[in-house]
Image (cartoon, helix red, strand yellow):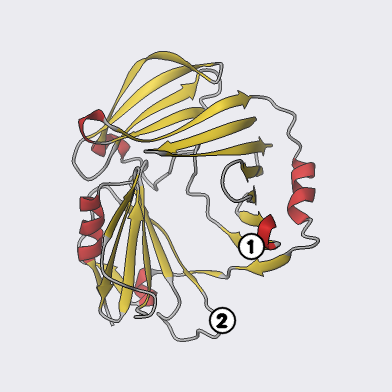
Amino acid sequence: YTGTLVVSSGASMSASRIWHVCDGTQQMERVETLTGAPRSTIRHNNDVITFVPDHKVAWTDKRESLGVFPELLRTPSNSIPDFYSVSESGVDRVAGHLTDVVQIVPRDALRFGYRIWAEKKTGLVVKLQTIGEQGAVLEQVAFSELQLDAPVRMDRLKRIMGDTRGYQVLRQELRKTTPEAEGWRLKEPVPGFQPMSCHTREDIGASASGSAPMQWVFSDGLASVSLFVEPFDPQRHGAEKAVVTGATHSLTRRVGSHWLTVLGEVPTATLKRFAVALERTR
């Protein structure tokens, strides 16, 4: 498919053009920003490259596919019904396509609700609203234009992905690890959220265990939370604070000689549960 995806959150709005193709074993996707600074990201399965034309820089890395819109996050076991109730709420049209509308309501205050529009024939999610208290729409992601069965060619996307002429190619070295190996653990789990992945971003010259920034990702099947842990730097890290941008909440705090940033599309109270539970084991 090809389409124009619009994200609205409060007074801000952004748009991107998407080309997506899947042959059953491989997925390729190109996302080009239409608002703000020009940027183009191409993903081939877990391999990702992001071109930044203004600076003639291309960043390459590997990302595990936890799922980005219009995919939903997946957890090792389907625990969604334990923490959300699901109901159908009729049929609607989005970007000219007939869709089934589904309401997802959280069973506790640790997560937001969702309203999902799925294209009737393919099941592709074409619109998604994140719902807060009193039914307020915190964020909306929707296709304003969508062509299914579009003539998107994987070989052409591969050529674009590999053409880095004129760009400085920078590589982010990600290393799979475990929180235990890095010296961290949660004193108690946050209900519904299961660990999905953990990796470090290795800094050049960093060799001591625990010195490289670590990202620990959790999911309840719909919402995700990331814990970023790095050595505390008084020059970069200021006061502890909480920030809200639409449905995305973040919380920062100092944990001993480290700096923790908790980020996710969940209420601030949920982030606090993670922040309080994280502790150093060595």
- Mark 1–mark 2 distance (CA, rounded to whole Å): 16 Å
Q: Which residue is under mark 2?
A: 204
The amino acid on which the numbered mark 1 sits, given as a three-letter code, is: Trp
The kind of secondary structure element at disc 2 is loop
Residue 188 is situated, as x and y percent measured from the top left of the image, at 20, 61
Instruction: Say which amino acid is labelled 2.
Output: Ile
Spot occupied by residue 30 in the image (x, y as percentages of width and height): 66, 44
SS at badge 1:
strand
Count residues near mark 1 (Cα–Cα under 10 Å), then give few for <14, some for 14-19, many for 20+. some
Q: Name which quarter of the figure residue 275 lies in.
A: bottom left
Task: Answer with left or right where residue 246 lies relative to residue 92.
Answer: left
In this picture, residue 197 sits left or right of residue 54: left
Give residue 34's position: percent from left, percent from top: 61, 41
Q: Are there few (<14), some (14-19), or many (20+) residues within 10 Å of tag 2?
A: few
Q: Which residue is mark 1?
A: 59
Q: Nearer the viewer, residue 51 or 209?
A: 51
Q: Is residue 163 left or right of residue 264?
A: right
Pinpoint residue 152: horizontal percent, then vertical percent: 73, 34
- Looking at marks 1 and 2 on the same chain, the residue that comes earlier in the sequence is marked by 1
Point out the image quarter for the C terminus.
Answer: bottom left
- Which disc number belongs to residue 47? none
Identify which residue is drawn at 22% across, 50% down.
191
Q: Is residue 213 above or below residue 45?
A: below
Q: In the rendered image, which quarter is residue 143 located in?
A: top right
Between 197 and 214, the residue placed more toward the observer is: 214
Residue at figure coordinates x 40%, y 27% from the top left:
116
